[in-house]
Image (cartoon, rainbow, N blue to C red):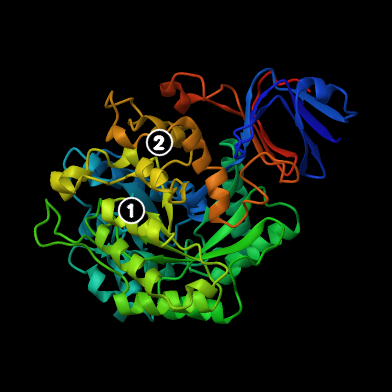
Amino acid sequence: MEKIFFNGCIRTLDDAGSVAEAVGIENGKIAFIGTNEEAQKIPCEEKTDLQGRLLLPGFVDTHLHMLHYAFVERSVKLFDCKSVEEALKAAHKRLEEHAGKPLTWLYCRGWNEEHFDEPRYPLKEELDALSKEIPIIMVRVCGHVAVCNTPGLERLKKIPQFAEIAKDVDFETGLLKENAVQFYSSVLEAPSQEEVESYIVYSAKKLNECGFTGVQSDDLASLPGKNWKRIMNAYKALDARGELNVRHYEQCLFERAEDAKAFIEEGYRTGQRGDHFTIGPMKLIQDGSLGARTAAMNEPYEDSPGNTGIITFTQEELDDLFAFFDRHQMQAAVHCIGDRAMDMVIEAIAKSPYRKDNAKNRHGIVHCQITNPRILKEMKEHDILAYIQPVFVDLDMNTVEPAIGAHRMEGIYAWKSMLDLGIHASGGSDAPVDSFDAMENIYFAVTRKNIYGEPEEGWIPSERLSVDEAVKLFTKDAAYASYTEDENGTIEIGKNADFVILEKDIYKIDQNEIKTTKVDMTILGGRTVYERKCDIKK
């Protein structure tokens, strides 16, 4: 045996709920599961005493923007700003820092007017005051609304797709919505493949530090220039060199239906894989966000009379796309936050005449926030996955009811109801919208409290999950969403040796302590990719 971890609490998450004391690794696979006594009898090159620590399957985030996370980390971050003025100061500071070597554009992200002392959006004229020479964009935390300056608007007008997004551009205020925000990246210079690879390596390192051995990530449209082929080449190059330290399942986003079809017609299919990089589902965006009041609702917003949000694709277009995906053996994952968006996607999935012939037909809805009992029943009936984000409890709990009204609160953010119905739900973070810290995500799912521990009884407490259910969102259930349940997600003989070792047993400690529990070690295919300074003894 190459490696054995012993004297631990090893929760296998198998169907029997087995708990072991020791686990062994050979050639990157799990080769032994048993007791300390059994482990002691096995000749082994390296034995590690866990000293009672909890060992789980490695975590998987089933919806984030891994590349964009790294890009935002190197951009101007506005997440903690308490006013438009603070956001403008942060942008001005970056411009001053580069005064000797002027920037050619400035990207800022993370403002949230709901956290401002004076709730309002930035304005074009305020960004113009920073610079009338280079494009500047300030993207809201959700990524569905932004404001840019005059040079940015002038460049945006010149892109070939402008006629398609003109309706989402306000030249007076500089406000961009939905696809206009996405297409804005087209006006900026694309990073080199070397730069893209550096973004990937950076993100993987940070994910490893949080216990992640896998991601299901939306990346192809996530960087300036939107050069999806360069992004694919970067992932494949790292994978070929053995330098990709997460198992990556790509959620392939194209904003336009014709681009999505062209990608498939080039021969790409769900399940095509290298060692650590796999083509996953086609990703669609069907509506906007709750914070921007662009999520598509069946009834108008409570605080925005007459506004029911936006939809990207008509019902006819969605029907055509799902039939196309099913004919071409493609899985699909669709961003839907509002109930109207979900209704349309469910109808398209249900109507597809080819779904039964599609071996990759585990279609899913990403976010699934404003659900109701009828929608949940239909998701179960049509076997539709739910990609949920526990961290949104912290982000949204104080903003949902004012937006949709008390009469629509039944069945929203309904994760326990989903699991009780037998819906396949898996956990993600939507980073960089919010943190991909696994311990925080599990804490939010279990307590339904915000990061400060409020409210005491939890927000919609009937939808709280057990620790085991929350852990499985990021392990066993995540593997199902990527068709890798025979390889990952549980600790069983023959599966990949992907583990996370925690400093405390989150199954036993006070639930409020889960959020601060540290990851001590992350192991990918038997190889340690992260180790915290602690007293684990080898």
Local secondary structure at mark 1? helix
Q: Amino acid at mark 2?
A: Ala
Query: Which residue is drawn at the image coordinates 38% and 70% (left, top)?
Result: 350
Query: Which residue is more in the foreground, 171 or 381?
Result: 381
How far from the left and from the top, in percent, is residue 495? 71, 46
Q: Is residue 458 left or right of residue 355?
A: left
Q: Residue furthest right?
A: 43
How far from the left and from the top, in percent, is residue 173? 19, 62
Residue 138: in sight, yes or no? no
Which label's residue is closer to the chain start, 2 or 1? 1
Quarter of the image for residue 307 reads bottom left
Image height check: is 37 above or below 118? above
Q: Amino acid at mark 1?
A: Leu
How far from the left and from the top, in percent, is residue 299? 15, 59
Residue highlighted by disc 1: 376
Query: Which residue is more in the foreground, 259 or 164?
Result: 259
Q: Which mark is residue 445?
A: 2
Residue 388: in sight, yes or no? yes
Between marks 2 and 1 in the image, the one whose residue lies nearer the viewer: 1
Neighbour tally class for label 2: few under 14, some 14-19, many 20 plus, Cα within 10 Å: many
Image height check: is 368 above or below 14? below
